[in-house]
Amino acid sequence: MLRDGALKGKNILITGGGTGLGRSMGEYFLELGATLIITSRKLDVLEETAKEMMSQKGGKVIPLACDVREIVQVEEMWAKAIEACGQVDVVLNNAAGNFISPTERLSTNAFNTVLDIVLKGTSQVTLTAGKYWIAQKQPGVFLNIVTTYAWTGSGYVVPSAAAKAGVLAMTRSLAVEWAKYGIRSNAIAPGPFPTEGAWSRLLPGDLVKKFDPAKKVPIGRVGEHQELANLAAYLVSDFSSYVNGEVITIDGGEWLKGAGEFNNLDQIPEGMWDMMEASRGKKH
Ligand code: HXC
Ligand code: NAP
C-alpha cells in the first residue's frame, strides 16, 4: 500500500513477532525498508522466523527472547535492541495470551496469566521504551494490538477483554500525556484474522465448524493478513504523523453487526420481505 522504502531508516520492535499477525505485519515493514527486532518467549521460533524473513525479503531481523511478564527480561531485551540497532523508533505491542473458558472455571493463576501477558506485559514494554525515549529526547511511536471486545466486553474471554480494555485506556491516556515528548500512541482492533495461535485456543476442535467466524462478518469473510499489515504500516509510518490516540477497527463490520439490535434480520429471505410489503398493500 505504501510506496517502496516508506519505512526505510525505521527500527521497529515487535512483541510476539515470531508468529501469526506479528510476523505478517513485520514482513510488510521489512519489505518497506524497516529493520526489525522480533521478540517473544521462544527463541528457536524467533530465529527461524528471522532467517526465513531475511531470505524472502532481505533486510535485517534481530530475534531477542523475552517474556514480557518479567520486567528484568524486558529491560535486558530493550538494552540489547538498542545495542544492536542504535535506536528503536517504533514499538508494536502485539504479544498476547488468550483461551476460551467459562469464567467461573478459571483458576486465579489462569486469569492472572492472561492479564499478565496482555496488560502487564504491554505496560512493562511501554514504560521501558517510553522512559528511554523521554530521557534521550527521542520521538517514538507505539502501536498496540487490541480487539473490538476491548470496548464491548465479551463472555468466555473475560481476562483478555479486561486486559485489552486496559491496553486501550493506556493507549489513549499516553497519547495525550506523552505527545509533548513527540511520542504517538495508537491502537488497532482487528476482527477475525486466522492464525494458528488464535484459532487453536479460541476455536479448538470442532468449534471452528460450529462457529464459522466469517458468518458474523457483514463483508462475508475473515480478514487477510496483508489487510492488517497495510493499516499497521500506515500507523507506524510518518504518513500518520497527526494520528494520535486513535483505535482503528479492521473487522469487516463484525462488531457493529453484533451490536445492532435488528441486524440479524439479514436472515429473513427476500420472499418474506415481499410478502410483508404485499400485506401492507404497497405496489412495486
Ligand atoms: C482454562 C487454562 C487454559 C484453558 C491454560 N490454563 N489454558 N485454563 N482453559 N484453555 C491455565 C493453566 O491451567 C494454568 O493455571 C494457567 O492457565 C497458566 O497456564 P500455563 O500453561 O502454565 O501458562 P503459560 O505456559 O504461561 O501459557 C500461557 C497461555 C498459553 C496463555 C495459557 O495459551 C499461551 O502461551 N498463549 C500465547 C499465545 C496465544 O494465546 N495466542 C492467542 C492470542 S489470540 P493453573 O491454575 O492450572 O496453574 C487473541 C485474539 C483475540 O488474543 C480476539 C479474537 C477475535
Ligand atoms: P499468536 O500467533 O499466538 O501471537 C501471540 C504472540 O505472543 C506469539 O508470538 C507468542 O510467542 C507471543 N507471546 C505470548 N506470551 C508471551 C509472553 N509472555 N512474552 C512475550 N511474548 C509472548 O496469535 P495472533 O492471532 O497472531 O495474535 C497477535 C495479536 O493479535 C494479539 O495481540 C491478539 O490478541 C491480537 N488479535 C488477534 C486476532 C485474530 O483473529 N488472530 C483478533 C484480534 C486481536 P511465544 O509463544 O514465543 O512467546
Image (cartoon, helix red, strand yellow):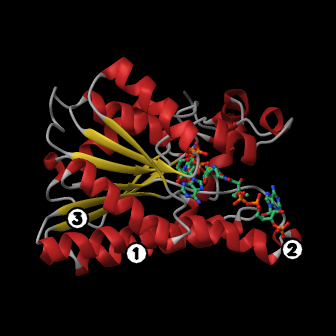
Residue at point 83%, 37% (across, down) = 210
Q: Is residue 258 visible?
A: yes
Residue 27 x %, y %: 37, 31
Q: Residue at x 71, y 62 (%)?
A: 157
Mark found first going from the N terminus, 2 or 3 = 2
The image quadrant of residue 104 is bottom right
SS type, badge 3: strand
Circle 3 residue:
184
The mark found on residue 104 in the picture is 2
* Circle 2 Cα neighbour tier, 10 Å, few/some/many (<14 / 14–19 / ≥20): few
Query: Please, what is the three-letter code of the amino acid marked with disc 2?
Result: Glu
x, y percent for residue 65: 50, 51
Q: Please name the residue that numbered disc 1 is placed on.
A: 170
For the point 50% across and 39% down, the residue is 46
Q: Residue at x 62, y 71 (%)?
A: 115
Residue neighbourhood size for the residue with mark 3, other residues' Cα within 10 Å, grouped as few (<14), some (14–19), many (≥20)? many
Please state the horizontal and vertical placement of residue 10, each as a whole percent of the image: 19, 45
Image quadrant containing the N terminus: top left
Depth order, front residue of 120/212: 120
Tell me: 69 left or right of 271.
Answer: left
How far apart, in angstroms, are the residues tagged by discs 2 and 3? 38 Å
Q: Position of residue 224 (x, y in %)?
A: 49, 30
Q: Is the CB atom of the residue marked by disc 3 within 8 angstroms of ligand 2's nearest atom? A: no
Instruction: Determine the CA span between mark 3 and mark 1.
Output: 12 Å
**Residue type, label 3:** Arg
